[in-house]
Amino acid sequence: MATRPDKHSAVEHLAGAMEEASLSGERGVALRELRCLAQVDLRADVRDARAAGRLAAALGSPLPTKPNTTAGGEPWSTLWLGPDEWLVVGPEGDELRIERALRAALAGAHGSVVDVAANRTTLELRGPLAREVLAKGCALDLHPRRFRAGDCAQTALARAQIVLRQVDGEPRYWILVRCSFAPYLVEWLIDAMAEYGGVRSSPAPAWGSPSSGR
């Protein structure tokens, strides 16, 4: 679905700066915003087998129950946030579809469904040096043996609270950050990327689908 003209991003004015700072190649790293992704917070009791089954059918995959993991892919993916909390992410405009599907699945069961898309924007950092850029301001151990494709975590990056998801082994990361902190974090990331060249001298890598999963 096309972006509605009345929707604005907290970092849309920095799109050019992100593109300018992005580098391709063997020592490349690229940054962009994934605008207006659907984000719905789900609370549920997975001990209720019937509700868990209905939720799995609605989402296309079972809820991830292992801490700091994700499930699903196209069109919706689900990030583990806690023992009874998940974040369902999908393409722009899918908020209502996700809400309706989850509410129907929870009918008669304990739980809650809340659209939280307005709380955060999503930045995508990718390329061979993406991990090194993140390591400058994130205390997580991002070594591939400890944090890999399909993992997610609530953490801090440059003292901003984020949800970090590693989408694939390129590596490609999603950084979900509150809109009020997003401009600061984009500028911090651009500064952290400057060590590797600062201005792109060749075309940036082709972007994949923003809703792709593990």
Image (spheres, rainbow, N blue to C red):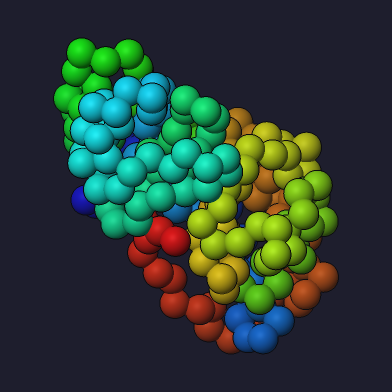
| Residue 89 horizontal side relative to residue 172, left or right | left
Instruction: Report which quarter residue 8 is drawn in.
Output: top left
Between 199 and 102, the one lying in front of the other is 102
Decide if residue 77 is in sight here. Answer: yes
| Residue 75 horizontal side relative to residue 156, left or right | left
Instruction: Report which quarter residue 22 is drawn in.
Output: bottom right
Residue 82 spot, x, y in % from top left: 54, 30
183 w.r.t. 206: above or below: above
Between 22 and 120, the one lying in front of the other is 120
Please report the residue visible at 68 percent of the width from the left and 66 percent of the height from the top: 144
Residue 196 spot, x, y in % from top left: 77, 75
Please report the residue visible at 45 percent of the width from the left and 33 percent of the height from the top: 86
Please report the residue visible at 32 percent of the width from the left and 23 percent of the height from the top: 48
8 w.r.t. 111: above or below: below
49 w.r.t. 89: above or below: above
Please report the residue visible at 21 percent of the width from the left and 39 percent of the height from the top: 58
Residue 80 spot, x, y in % from top left: 50, 38
| Residue 198 horizontal side relative to residue 73, left or right | right
Between 62 and 5, the one lying in front of the other is 62
Instruction: Report which quarter residue 105 is drawn in.
Output: top left
Residue 107 spot, x, y in % from top left: 19, 18
The C terminus: image quadrant = bottom left
Decide if residue 10 is in sight here. Answer: no
